[in-house]
Image: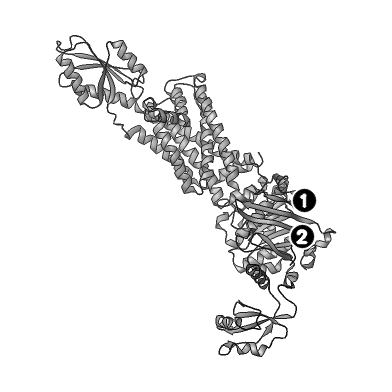
Amino acid sequence: MNGYLSVVRKEIVHLRRDMTTLVMALLLPLIQVMLYGYAIDFDVRHIKTVVVDQDRSRESREYVRKLRATQYLDPDLTAASESDAAHLVQINDVKVAVIIPPGFSRTANPQVGVLIDGSDSQVATRARMAFTSAGSSEGVQARANVLFNPNMRTATFMIPGLIGLLMQMITVSLTSFSLVREREQGTLEQLMVSPIGRLGLMLGKLTPYAGVALFEFALILMFGYFLFDVSVAGSLLGLIVLSTPFILANLALGLLISTFAQNQAQALQFAMLTLMPSVLMSGFIFPRDTMPGAIYLISQVLPLTHYLNIVRGVIVRGEGFFDLLPSAGVLLLISSLLILVSTRRFRKSLA
Amino acid sequence: MRAGGGQGGGASCPQIDSAKEGTVVSAIEIQSLTRKFGDFTAVDSLTLDVAKGSIFGFLGPNGSGKSTVIRMLCGLLEPTSGDAKVNGFDVVKESEKVKRSIGYMSQAFSLYRDLTVRENLDFFGGVYGLKGTHLNERRDKVVELVGLHPYLDRRAGQLSGGWKQRLALAASLIHEPDLVFLDEPTAGIDPVARRDLWDLLFQLAGEGKTLFVTTHYMDEAERCSDIAYIYLSKLMVRGTPAELKALPEVSPPHTRRFAIAVDPPARGLMALRGQPQILDATLVESEIHLLVPENVDLPRVKKALDGLHVGEFRPIEPSLEDVFVTLTRRIASQ
């Protein structure tokens, strides 16, 4: 721990001196919050749909054909009863169930029952639109029943995910930059001829960035609350405690990158490289349930995957601290592995 | 050629009063130190002894293994075989103690450019465990030594080359090391700053510090109390500058050295190299340095230069450059 406090103090001065980088690092994520929250719309098509046709008439078949024609719904599956269909929605990647009641073709104002899985707001919104457009010409009324996230708000889905993604982005890049810069400028060598402890140096460097990450965490949370009306359903303190293993994993990842990258440009590319799978495979945007086996396995290794479970669990579903401990445990496991590998590589990369 | 000998080299340099210590003790003892990188041997069984209080010039062409030796002595790199003791501490087993007792000033400026002079010094002081009033005292001391007062609150990156090196020197001295490694401390700074830095080094040596300096400048090598020259990973020669110039390989018995100004010098050099009486001819600035037998027929030599503007023969001592060029050629021709 030799020199820990000196390094912490020095890093804080570095951060203060390079305000541009810090402000950009903090501001860019907020811009992304705005983009994801307001502007970006996911064009979801071909939603798996199960049909319960209790009327079995020409009209009911025509209605299903029209649903298919919207391209949003793929009514390929059929079920015998409403409860069977509901069960499919619950356990499978089937997102929508359409129940056409008997007598559908004989009433003047035909109605259908619809079950929508609202946990993914994009899917749910699209599904709703499909029913509106398919039914408008014949006056078919769809009584939709959204099972989770009843208001189907994108923000409720996106903001918690963004907290994870953006914290990963700034901690990984800032940490790796800070270390690579020491190597680039030759200051690392000057440090290594001093009696500074490796642990003191590492922790001293990581502490301020953990602080920055927590600050960003609070910032996005406030943004979410004031602009998008997303509040924390569960315990805020619990969320902070459960976030630390995730921050730890990202700092270690930054450290690992710094042992590969020779300069800051390379570090940036490596950071981007870790970001891509996190965006695409963690469930941040695309549901993981539909991923093919190999991809699903990779997604299990990503810290963000497990953190999304925690952050969405606490903020959206109000899950308790102890229910989420397994996810935190996996994160701790990933971080210890990363720290082990990166400190070992770091030692080598000095020589 | 002597390798690994030369005890008490520091005593022969007038600027240094190492005798006040009573007995001259070694600051560095190196025994058959070897470092291999794969098949490549970067340092080949180096044995060397550096006396306390000396300004030790560690010379050699680029890639000869100088930096590798320094890295091993500073505990940054483990030797493949052999032993080295720095300030009495084993560089492998007691590397922490070694690090506390040495200062290191690297070739490239390696302090934080975005930190001020004061912040840099405070940081490195803190790294060595100095704090509070002791740290302040030490900082004031080194600032006074190198004369950095006016720039205390300036960012290190905004200092000129010479001042940067002074700051680096100050930082390497903040924890009062007995021994300071200086890896090409004057590379890339202007002549005045170079002279000033060397004045500082003499002052430090006068205070009893041992300075282990690498350089490519021969005039700087001349100022060292003791010199080791390594070539192709091996120690080629060591001794005081005077001892090296007197080496029989450099100054064979019954030979003399002359300098002669010739214009154009390159044509003169070509004409002279063919002459039977010329043992060696080298171009140094606008003059040609000649190694000739004692009984040389100078007018005959001059005849070979007919048609060129020729000055007078001037007897000279071999320079350190002559020493290294001669020795290096001998090895290359073997």
Q: Residue furthest top?
A: A102
Residue type beneath disc 2: Gly
Camera-nearest residue between B94 and B149: B94
Q: Position of residue B142 (x, y in %)?
A: 69, 55
In the rendered structure, the answer to whether residue A80 lies left or right of residue B318 reads left
Q: CA distance from mark 1 to mark 2?
A: 14 Å
**In the image, residue B60 above or below residue A62:** below
Mark 1 falls within which chain? B
Q: Nearer the N terminus, badge 1 or badge 2? A: 2
In the rendered structure, the answer to whether residue B313 lies left or right of residue A218 reads right
> Could you tell me which secondary element the residue under label 1 belongs to?
loop
Q: Position of residue A33 (x, y in %)?
A: 39, 34
Q: Quadrant where the N terminus of chain B lies?
A: bottom right
Q: Which residue is mark 1?
A: B88
Q: Position of residue B313 (x, y in %)?
A: 66, 85
Camera-nearest residue between B1 and A200: B1
Residue type beneath disc 1: Gly
Residue B247 lies in quadrant = bottom right
For the point 70% across and 59% down, the residue is: B212
